[in-house]
Amino acid sequence: MKRLLKVIPMLLLMIVATGINAQQRVSVSGTVVDAKNLPLIGVAVVEKGTRNGVETNLDGKYSISVSSSNSILVFSYLGFITKEVSLKDASVVVLNEDTQLLSEVVVIGYGQVRKKDATGAITVIKPEQLNRGAVTSPQELLVGKVAGVQITPGDGAPGSGPTIRIRGGASLKASNDPLLVIDGIPLANDAAPGMRNALASINPNDIESFTILKDASSTAIYGSRGSNGVIIINTKKGSKNFKLDYSSTYSVNQNIKTLNALSASEFKAKLEEAYPAGSTVANAIAALMGTYDTDWQKEIYQLGLSTDQNINLSGTVAKVLPYRISLGLNKQNGTLKTSSFDRYTASLTLTPAFLKDHLKVNGNLKFVNNNNQFADGGAVGAAVFFDPTKPMYNYNQDGTINTKLFNGYYNWGTIQNPNTLSGTNPLSLLHDKYDKSTTNRVIGVLELDYVVHNFQDLRAHLNVGFDAALGRGKNGVMWNSFQSIKDADFKSFGRSTTWRNLRRNQVLDFYLNYVKEIDAIKSKIDVMGGYSWQKVFKQDYSKEASNHLYNPVVKKETTFPTESALLSFFGRLNYTLMDRYLLTLTFRNDGSSRFAKENRWGMFPSAALAWQMNKESFLKDSKVVSDLKLKLGYGVTGQQELLLNDYPYIPLYNMSTVNSNYLFGSTFYSLLKPTGYDPNLKWEETTTYNIGLDFGFFSNRITGSVDVYKKETKDLLNEIDIAAGTNFANRIVTNIGSLKNDGIEFNINAIAIENKEMSWEIGFNATWNQTEITKLTASNNPNYLGVEAGDNLSSGTGGTIQRHVVGYKPNTFFVYQQVYDVNGNPIQNLVVDRNKDGQITEADRYLSEYSPTPKYYLGLNSMFKYKKFDLGFNMRANIGNYIFNDFAAANSSAANFTNQGFLTNMVDVVYKTGFIKTNAPQQLKSDYFVEDASFVKMDNLTLGYNFSKVLLDRLSGRLSFSVQNVFTITKYSGMDPEVFNGIDKNIWPRPRIYTLGLTLNF
Amino acid sequence: MLDNMKNTKILITIAVASLSLTSCFKDLDLKPLDENTYTVDRAYSTEISYTQGLAKIYSVMAISGQDGAGSTDITGIDPGNSQFLRSLWNLQVVTTDECKNAWSGDSWVPELNNNTWSTIKNESIDGVYYRAMFIVALTNEYLKQTTDDKLNSRGHSALIPTVTKYRLEARFMRALAYSVLIDTYGNPPFITENDPIGSYMPSQIGRAKLFEYVEKELLDIESKLVAPRANEWGRADQGAAWTLLARLYLNAKVYTGTARYTDCITYCKKVIAGGYSLAPNYAHLFMADNNTSAAKNEIIFPIVFDGNKIPTWGGMTYLVASSRAGAEKSSVNNGTQQAWDGNRSTEKLVDKFTYTDPNADYPVSSDKRAIFYGKGRTKTIENPLSTFTKQGWSVFKFTNVTSTGGKGAHNDFPDTDFPFFRLADVYLMLAEAVVKGGTGATMADAIGYVNQLRGRAYGNATGNISSLDENFILDERSRELYWEGTRRSDLIRFGKYTGGTYLWPFKGGQPQGVAIDARYNLFPIPVSDMISNPNLVQNDGYTN
């Protein structure tokens, strides 16, 4: 294989070298311009029926010698209509933009294709400036815009990242995140240490386009990483004419949701109801009760102010060096006190061309510096439950704050005896803790695209890229804080952790692309073949030490380096017959360092057919149908993001940390432990079938598409229990089981109104997706209640409430069945004895039909323009998604007093349930708390005013005002119906953001 | 032609550049970079690694994982709650007349409190099973990696005498793990160092056959181990092997159907001749310095804990913290800042003693082994859950305070070692074997040993006895060994655990106690293992 690799380019070279022949020739020269009479650079000028061709230079001029004066010249240029011209008309050639398709060149893996030639389920989103508010993460630009793509925004923390699922998850245990490719670099899964989100270090203003590859016929070119879809992000490049753009936004982030915690008096009343006066417990409660009435939730939130400033310069130096320089600054203060995020970005793009445009270079360097101050999100829950009868601060008798006791913040217990089981004052969670990080990241790409001299149909493409990020941070508690007083090792000093994480991702791709139109058989072939090499190195360092100023005691210090590599060969054939029958075949052969030699290589093929029906005679002249394409696709993709270590197939040992030893005599020994492994681990494999129809009506005033798909994953990476005593772990991740996704996607965009003064565009998309587990274990036991899944519940020593079970959706809720009284109120601690054995045990739990995955999700976008004003909004709905309201379950009873020396507040759930007894374990897992969390949200509403030709006619721009998180309609009783994993615990509420924006273009 | 040359050059440059940057297939053979992650041969490349490998096997009884109290070797269960000693203690003590737990949020609690567990996952049942089987797996691997051949090939021939001793201790630990499994699950899967690792479905050989195997192993190693009290603290010696044999023989009728009381007496006598002596003060056996005070002379085999170096949320931390109330921490110092409102005694245990002042905060008995706290509490538990500070006396036997009144080194995790085997237990085993018809010791010997314990408890001879019967032995075991993790086995051996001949509060889930089915003499094999290993047969009475 290695030898073959060297041979391919040599062979191609030989083909090139033999194709030339000198003859008696006719010279012709001319200029190629566009409709505005501007010269077009790089237009291919080819003598028809030969391989003889040149390109136009920077002035749009060309010169070619052809074999006879009767020769025809073919002028082709991407995005323009190809023109055939006889020599007499060749001095000035005007090419017209292919208006219908101008902006519809689609970036696909390792190449690009005209949208009309695309055969897969691909969506392109160009982030237009008009309809958006303060956007920090690039992913937010996609929310609700694309059928088949579900994006759950992160929580309210600044810089938090959304979760993206394309056509449902294909995995249970392995990652379900789509592959992100920025300017040709596939990102490592956790690309940026110290960031809440892999893309938060990319400035959204630098993004030219997103291409979302959804079906396997388009993602199979990414082989083992294509199962969960691919998002290709290309950044902006230089322009022909000098441009200076400035944009700035100022935002106010406002917390709009608090939970209805009880006031001091309500709290007292409720406790009195639960514990009769005079009882031992009531007396204990009375002794703990304070005299204040503190609204803790009011104290932790702030109005967060944010700004985003961007300046971009682009143009072309001396007509040969197109450039773009962008500088960005984003500063945010979160709605939780002490939280902040700031980001400085710089990007330089140079796209020169050499050798008469035969060698095109794209050099791009992005730098980001990101600083986070993380606030403890636990303060949100702490503020709900901290005793409202207590003051915020410890006061001296003279009314001043006693800073000697817990740094002044009221907390349970004394310095000698702090209460280790109670909650912590939310203000000390925010102010007595620090958690900072700084990340520097550099992404560099050098792309060389060479059109082979005298063999214009062949292109060689080399892409070398790297992505290196270094994050550092420190977190810990303040001296004398409540947390430090509780520190069993370093009382009153507390401890802190310093960390430094490095990520290095190197990529090299090389491919050859051959494009040929063969008029004789009305065919066009486009063949690409190449290989790719990628290596990811990670190193995490952390040191946990006491906060002593001198000679801090190191509790733990670890350095953990690890690496993985991927080697791939890939190829693609696009064949077009009569400009209307399209065939795409792709393959990729991937080798991953994460698997043993025998399982290392995986082959991922795909095939797709498309039929451009509108070009057939029966539709050609239709006034209604302007575009109609039927697509069929099939492909196999894989998954290797195991979310395990990088060497899961090798039997390994590890050494315990200083925190786990054993004593022999008087010597403590570290512990040497063999770790669990699976030597037979291999790829997950997903097979996808897709049928799609793209349509356009009335000269494409209405466009859209429908796609029906089926995805089947086998050799599912699944964490299963293994026979006890046979390995060094009780569970290992191994290839067992399968699941399927069925779905329908629909989207439609319409220009409802279009005239000189007014226009109105609406876009709507809808997705139905259903995931079902079809196999989980080697032997099928009908009584097997599946794999425990999801987060632990917050009450007791946890336990989960979700299961993966054959025949059900992943993460189906596994609950007890609540019993209700005649009025429909739940009867506390009474659940149905489903197996009728006379007692309530775990065996009485059942699989509900509910899971957190929505059945349908919908998006609606609108943009209305009137003269210089525009008004736009984005809306989104999820239907059929359920949440286990763990927050309500854990706090559903007014009998929450544990007699451990502290009080815990309640929320209004206790009024709803009426529970005043201690909850039995089964009450905490009752289906009463499984709630329908369907919702409709308006994510964004924007009003803009556009101006142009002011200040010497040079300046244009836009002034806008937008609101994000405008409203939510839902029946869900908790804080927010959008909880990705379906277990609603303690979430930092997503704020409402008001943004004023100004853009100026010179 | 010039163009051709140029073509050639450019393409070759690109091709060569790209190939040289990618060293190709070798890149896929990556080995771990982390210096704490080893391939097998690297793991055993240093001398100390053989001790560290053995230490891991012992440590499974004390801690839950490789990185402090929050880490776990067994996934899917809470690290602290599934810790070996804590889970075993729950099965052996919470399911009996000695204790009821007050935690309402944990689903394992009512199932063990009320003897109503089923094949549905229970963290304590899973904890003992998977951690005992983990000891088996670790031992098998250790035996494979430490053969003389392997040592020679790694250039460690000089270590062979030391490692030979280590291998005997590893086999002792495996025998201990199997004996726990025989007692709790009866018939676990049987795996030895001769079986492969991974992708293998072991079978069961039956409770009696497994008993035979464990007996054979122990008989093979007992004479080769280090002499009693001659090994380092924390490591097994002949005394530990003899005590384990005595315990197996005492329970042999339950495990195999054949009584072995004479063999029990033989091995008890070996232990008694081994140089151990009773601690002068009973309470010191359960204190933070029990590895250095005179109490250590009574302890035959400890599970070692250390607040700083051997921390866990299970083990001794659980025993100390769960038996104290959070609200009372300041008044009742246990040597840690942890107090969890969990375990307290039933009146059945409390009533094994008589009191001169039952209403004192610390009820007073002339038998100094009664270490209870009753302030504000009723003796009777009407509802076990969430009534810790109201119903049932607390047991303050285990503490992180030293015999001289000091505190353990750490504020969360005790230094107190757990006396897994101690001399007093051997005395009582001998006495029981004599009463049940074993030969090799006389009734007078038996009474003498029991009176040694009672003499210590009373501080004089007023508590001494002159005759012995089975019921007295069972009660005396409770008085001497309560909360030390043998109660369930004891009740089963006397036929009082299941059925209705002996009732205690919440046996079968009823406040007064009711008869329970005989299937509860064994715990079910966890359903997760039944699913993953189709070769296994579930215990009688449990359905999957």
Image (tube, coloured by chain):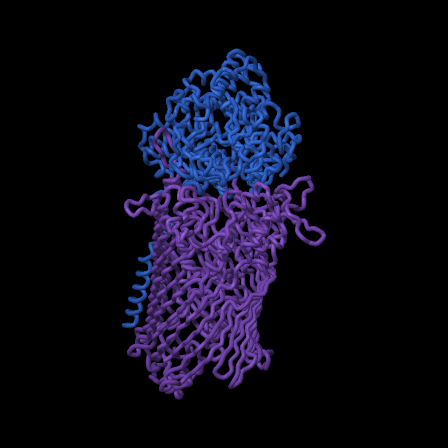
Chain colours: A purple, B blue
Residue A452 visible within the image: no
Picture quarter containing residue B536? top right
Give the vertical position of B153 relative to A717 (above or below). above
Task: Examine the image and state in which quarter residue A210 appears.
Answer: bottom left
Residue drawn at x 56%, y 45% is A777
Q: Is residue B502 left or right of residue A987?
A: right
The picture places residue A753, in percent across and down from the top left corner, at: 56, 81
> Residue A780's spot in the image, x, y percent?
60, 44
Q: Position of residue A272 (x, y in %)?
A: 59, 48
Q: Which quarter shows the N terminus of chain A?
A: bottom left
Q: Nearer the viewer, residue A28 or B370?
A: B370
Horizontal and vertical percent position of residue A189: 42, 56
Q: Nearer the viewer, residue B251 or A420?
A: A420
Q: Is residue B186 above or below residue A623?
A: above
Residue at 37% over, 37% down: A670
Q: Is residue A777 visible?
A: yes
Q: Nearer the viewer, residue B138 or B446?
A: B446
